[in-house]
Amino acid sequence: MRIIRLLFLLGVALTAFFVYRDYQSSRRDRDQRIPLPPEAIAANLNSRSGRWEWEQSDAESSRVTVSAQGFRQGKDSSTIQLTDVELRVYHDVDDAFDRIQTSEAAFDMDASRLASETEVVITLGVPADQPESEDPALTRIVAQGAVFDTKAGTADTEKETVYRFADGVGKSQGAFYDSASRYFWMKNQARIERFPAAPGGDTTIITAGSLYYQERDDRVDLRNGASLVRGSQHIEAAEGEVHLTEGKVRQIDARDARGSDASDGRKLVFSSPKLSAFYRDDQSLERVEGAGPSQMTSTTASSQLEVSGERVELRYGLPGSDGESTLDEALVQRNGRVFVQPVPGTKGDTRLIESAWLRLKMRPGGESAELVETLEPGRMAITPAGANAPSQRLEAAKIRVLYTPRNQMEKLEAQGDVKLERAAAAPRTEPLHTWSEFLAVAFDEAGEARELKQWKGFRFDDGERTGASDDALFTPARDELLMTGEAHIEDPAGRIDAHQIRLEQASEKLYAKGDVAAVYRNEGEQQDASAGLFAQSEPVYASGQEMESDQAAGVIVYRGAARLWQGANRVEGRSIRIDRPAQQLQAEEEVISYLEEKPKDEGAKPSMMVVHARRLDYSEKTRNAVYTDDVSLVRGDLHVQADWLEAKLSPADADESASLERAHATGDVEIVDGATKRRGIGQEALYTPEDELVILRGDPARALNEAGEETRGAELNYALNDDRLQVSGGRRSRRHLPSPQTLIRPPLHGDPPRRQAREELQGPQGRQQGLACHRARGGRGTAWPQRRRQDHIVPHDRRADCA
């Protein structure tokens, strides 16, 4: 703006007319001293002169000089006509001056006004040693006529004024200058064109309805509309102010500013009620601030980015090799909003981030955002393009989003009171809510979420189900949720706790590992009065090292020290499988079942039936429990060992307690009555607790009493509550045999499996023989021949049977 300021040197031409009276007086004195022949004077002339010069100087140097080729004054007129006028105004140091030239000027002595109807040329900074220099680098200002008021010290013109300087040109229609207040006014159609600093660059064009320059305040006011155009950049404002320091632009303020920029396939549009731009010493742009509801929109071929807020600050980096500053980051305060959506005809998510304070970090070159983060608690909403894809909403104390060069999300991070809401997607009907302290989401190249991790105090609620854990990892492609560290999931049907829980939400499958504990409730389900092992009105508990649940199929499997219980009733094994729709249970490997039977007599203590086996198949509908392979049953004083055993439970009574209705055992059956010391051996046995009756069949079946007497027969019937024994198809013989207690020991919890004990007694050869004999008789399970060591066995009759 120093160029514009120097334009005002037109005012110094006024000094040329203050010396007019001194010149007239001195000429009259000279004419009186040296008489000359008078020249004929035209009738219409009062005076006339040739070359005329005037100089005003101080004690040190010349300050202003005025010269003219001539002047003339009309008769009876106070107006003097000057021709070929030149003013030189020297700088503080006499190494340069500013030159003002005009071909003609008229001075009205009465009005103290000088007027020029011809072109006025001002050349700034002319070297003193080259006074006639026409160097094109010098700044020149050309006005098509001007009026100078010598008393007020003002210059005024309504004509077109042109400005030419080293790196640009300018013009205006009319101008006014007040030398006393150092005030300059480019009245109408002010226009300045600044040429690019480097070849190939864009010219900057600034226009305004009018321009006001106040030199004392170093300020330029743009009124009646202002605009800036530079290549594809276009800025408009209702009015603006330019603040200068020693001729350098420091700040530009604009009201009702709006603009656009289109380059490299990107279009930028912005608006602000009050826009301020700040510049560095090298005149590069440092930052831009927008106050009031401000908005910036960036549109590419695939997406549109919109930034808005009550205060927007754009910060620019240091200029590059081309001398231009590029946008480095943007800060949005008070009702900050960043909205990203796909352009019509393209696919993509719609994303909205809101916060009282937002920050955008731009990629090198300032073409697109690299990072968006909230510096205060904020919200983020994501709406997928697909009609069936669920929308998501995020709230946190701080949200941070990293973008790819294609303006797609690359990573999302959140911390502090994180809350995520995911809209319901089939088959769910309720939205999914999750909470945690931290959140991290990774996206694939297409901008789709690849995995979502939440940690430190994770919990979720989807309306039907709730859960919590230390950490959680969600994989959208598989719709899978992995919870680790003190995890649990709960719904109306029950609760599961484990170190790790994996939930496949689409297939409704659940996997748990590490100290799994569960409780199953039957609330709201129809109660079955015929329930046997487990009452449906009470919760059932389960545990194991691993668990697998298929909710759609209603199948649950526990592995590793599995246990299922309700009150005193329970089932244990290495694995337990529960089929809830079929009401079936299967247990395998080291199976133990416990059934508490309430006594018939009031006040008596309940008894416990304990069964060991390698496998259990139980049906709640039929109340049948089938045990296979190394079966051992203990019920009060009754001890039964067999290869296969079916226990039929009686219907539950009023208090939902069941009891054994009958037991059927086959395959190498051994029965010991602890009360009567009676021992029975056979291939099949039927026990009915109602009358305490045992039916033992064999080929033959054998019964031994405490006295060592043995009874053989095809079928033996005896009651446990007395000493009655009925033999069918056989004979009774008395032999002195070892006490039954030494022949079989009732298995207790923790005893080694029966098969292992028998292998140790018989060896491989006896085992093979026993299997062959048992299969020949159509036996079930694994049979063992009735052989013991020599001091524990009954002599074997090979011709009679294979027992």
Image (cartoon, rainbow, N blue to C red):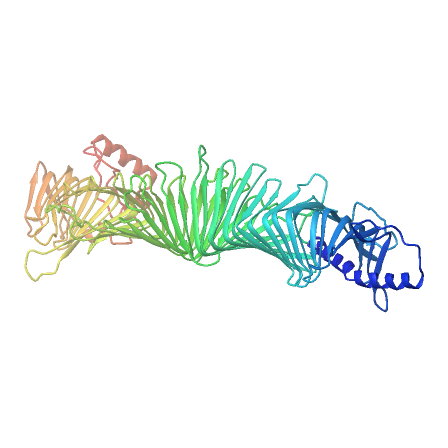
Q: Which residue lies furthest to the top in this view?
A: 776
Tell me: residue 509, above or below residue 740.
above
Q: Left or right? Give the position of 437 relative to 117.
A: left
Q: In which quarter of the image is the C terminus?
A: top left
Q: Residue furthest bottom?
A: 59
Q: Quadrant of the N terminus?
A: bottom right
The answer to whether residue 802 is seen in the rendering is yes
Residue 462 rendering spot, x and y as whole percentages:
30, 48
Residue 672 rendering spot, x and y as whole percentages:
17, 50
Q: Left or right? Give the position of 588 relative to 112.
A: left
797, 325: nearer the viewer: 325
The answer to whether residue 791 is seen in the rendering is no
Q: Left or right? Give the position of 635 relative to 70.
A: left
Q: Quadrant of residue 582?
A: top left
Tell me: residue 780, above or below residue 518.
above
Q: How many labels does the image show?
A: 0
Residue 431 rendering spot, x and y as whole percentages:
31, 47
Residue 729 rendering spot, x and y as whole percentages:
8, 36
495, 529: nearer the viewer: 495
Q: Left or right? Give the position of 565 relative to 255.
A: left
Residue at 86% from the left image edge and 63% from the top image edge: 26
